[in-house]
Image (cartoon, coloured by chain):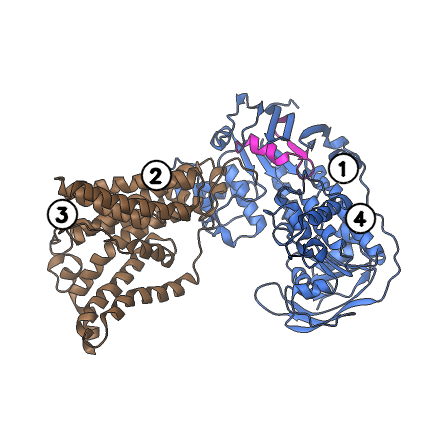
Chain colours: A blue, B brown
Amino acid sequence: MIMTTLLKVEKITKKFGDFYANDQISFEVNKSEVLAILGENGAGKTTLMNILFGHYTPDAGNVNFEGNAIEFGNTNNAIKLGIGMVHQHFTLAENLTVLENIIIGRQSIFSLSLPKRQARVKILELSKKFGLPINPDELVANLSVSEKQRIEILKTLFLDCKLLILDEPTAALTPQETDALFSTIRNMIETGLSVILISHKLNEILAVSDRIIVLRNGSSVGEIDTNSADRKKIAEMIVGKKIDYPQKKKIPRKSKVLSLVDVSYDKTDAPNLSKVNLDLYGGQILGIAGVAGNGQTTLAKILSGHFKPTDGKIVFNEAKSVLTSPKSFMDLGVAYIPEDRNSDGIVGDMEIWENAIMTEMDDPYLRNSLGIINKKTSFDRSENLCETYDIRMQSIRQRSRLLSGGNVQKLLLGRWLMRKPKIIIACQPTRGLDEGAIASIQNLLLKAQQNGSAIILISEDLDELLTISDDISVMYKGMLSDPTETSSTDKLSIGLRMAGDGFL
Amino acid sequence: MIEFIEIIFTAGFWAATIRIACPLILATIGEVLCERAGVLNLGIEGIMSIGAMVGWMTVFLGADLYTGILAALIIGGLFGLLHAIFTVYLGASQHVTGIGITMLASSLGFFCFKLILPASTTPPKIKPFQPIDIPFLSELPFLGPAFFQHTPFTYLAILVVIFAFWLMNSTPLGLSIKMAGENPMALEAQGIDVFLVRTIAVVLGSALMAVGGAYLTLSAFDAFYFGMINGRGWIAIALVIFASWKPERALLGALLFAGLDAYQVRAQQLAGAVIPYQFFLMLPFLLSIVAMVIAAKRTRYPKALLIPFRRGERH
């Protein structure tokens, strides 16, 4: 087969302040091929794509598309040439219909008519051709994540794109939805389109791409044919060093620290729970599997004091006071890693040191005699935290939102571990993180277990549950199954129970 | 007691309702355009004020009434542009800029008025728009005097509602405005200039506000004096929420408020001896607040309202 080059990127460099987000990156994309760009969070993948699509202007370098130089900083030009991009955070207006979201941009804003009828025909045609079922008149606010993604893809197809850039397209999809997306991608390749796929999930990249480029710290560190790719080697190429994969050790089980007795939650603000029973022991990691939205988050919020159960009892081994607020749970030694670390875990606009001591404000060591924050001791504490837990940043005075996901999670987990918690409620602690960060977080949890903490690990990642938990329960429609020992179960049987098998 | 109900069945009540509603309709639709694009325009009170002055002065200095409307339209658009430069391009606080524009525009308007007419103690007058009878329809009993014997400016205000409805629902610009106020990144991702769309919306919306002000001096009354907008701009801000940011519902909201206002004037005359007139003056505001509370419960703000858009920023 003769390869024809569609896109040629030459020595792209982009700086934010003194920080090189992209440093002399060059690559090519051929017709009818899926090129995967792999790299850790913060490696420069999204910046690079934003340059191709005209959101950013690079400091140096050239991009040619079908022999034409791309005009930087102009999305309109990129679209006209035939580049389409599906952003990681969807670019849809929820107050408009599917049809309206797709047709916008086709005409000049000064045009007096909006040819909805012709557009509808074309959209339905494309929808059929690429297997992307949609209802053009539905309001986008009413759609699920995977439906929204379909709209995003249709938007680019509607504008006749030849090169589709997908930025972390599977971040919020279930495994089934991911498979459907990949078959759509293969479909597109057969009709002559090209795709650039950005991801940090190795398995997915290996399944769907033709060629892989690895970025690390803003530079391209390698190009590999997917057929001859070696999983472990790529993972290490991404991280830039050997990954310390977690090794589970047998820990003697201690006394019971927590029981739930017939705990129910019956309100409209969150998925409900019905009669959940659970026992947790010191030195135990109890995994809770389940498809998102079956009540795991509600359970976590009850266990951390954010929600009050409508029925049932929470019994802590050492509870003396009445449990009224998240603070009283904290005082009992409960640590809570929220599902959405960026909105519920840290305050993005505050500095790293402020986030690092946020839960420690009752510690007199961090205050001076007037009760005002003592900056010196606070800085020391924060520096210490960042060093102990290997949180990579430029300075503790940096705004926290500039940290990568893995470092935010290490900050959150480290902040709790400093308090030597008795119980850790970890909600999707490694979701969206790259291989290196996942391994670090899992190692930290195992270490906490060795120090005697009891851990509830809520996760959708079955590999993770099977690797580090001692027992696994499954949550389905607000019901929690009895725990099974991890050594006596496997992916298949957990998967079946996640789909409702064995629940009444 | 029966007299209080009879008020509603007089043609005069309905004619007054429409007359009072017109400036509110224009101003509210102007604000709807701005806010739909994501820009709160608190300059509304001042822009109405300077629109009232410029429209009136243009006519006073010899131009015809329609040129007066055009002059108001232009001055409104210019102040809109000023608001857009600060809030859209420079990303300044929309609250602060808007209040600043209100203070600047209302004071500047009166200052210019005094510069041109320094000596006048009683406000000079112009000959404003006169009612025209719409053939046949104006001769209908009740309906004729209530709805079909208004000034051309009044019918123009109704046409603006239809224009705004068409703009928002059937043109690429309207769609872009709605998207700019909801998720500007979505607009940029489709290759449309968010700054341009927001600026157009603010300029157009501000022009309508100024025309709403000019209605007062060119159609409802015949003179200009300081403070004559008297909070109508702020009422329009509230009506936008009542209208859920939709032009057609802005018409409804303006009519409702105007109806209450027209009613209270008449009720005052009936019961003025027993109940203090201030009570009636308060009524439309009180009832508007009640209506707003009910309507606002299920309302959905444009998501990007008040949030400046910046290109090429790390998110």
Marks 4 and 1, the one that precedes in the sequence: 1
Discs 3 and 1 share one subunit: no
Whole-angstrom CA distance, mark 2 to mark 4, is: 57 Å
Residue tagged 3: B120
Q: Are marks 1 and 2 in contact (CB under 8 Å)?
A: no
Q: Element at badge 2?
A: helix
Same subunit, tags 2 and 4: no
Q: Which mark is residue A443?
A: 4
The residue nearer to you, when weighing A451 against A463, is: A451
Q: Is A156 contained in the magenta span?
A: no
Q: Quadrant of the N terminus of chain A?
A: top right
> Residue B81, which numbered label?
2
SS under mark 1: helix
Asked if labels 3 and 4 touch by Cβ distance under 8 angstroms, the answer is: no
Amino acid bearing label 1? Ala
Report, in whole angstroms, how far the alpha carbon at label 4 lies from the one at label 1: 17 Å
Callout 3: helix, strand or loop?
A: loop
Label 2: chain letter: B
Label 1 to label 2, Cα distance in Å?
53 Å
Chain letter, disc 1 residue: A
Residue drawn where x is 22% and y is 58% of the image: B20
- Residue B69 visible in the displayed image: no
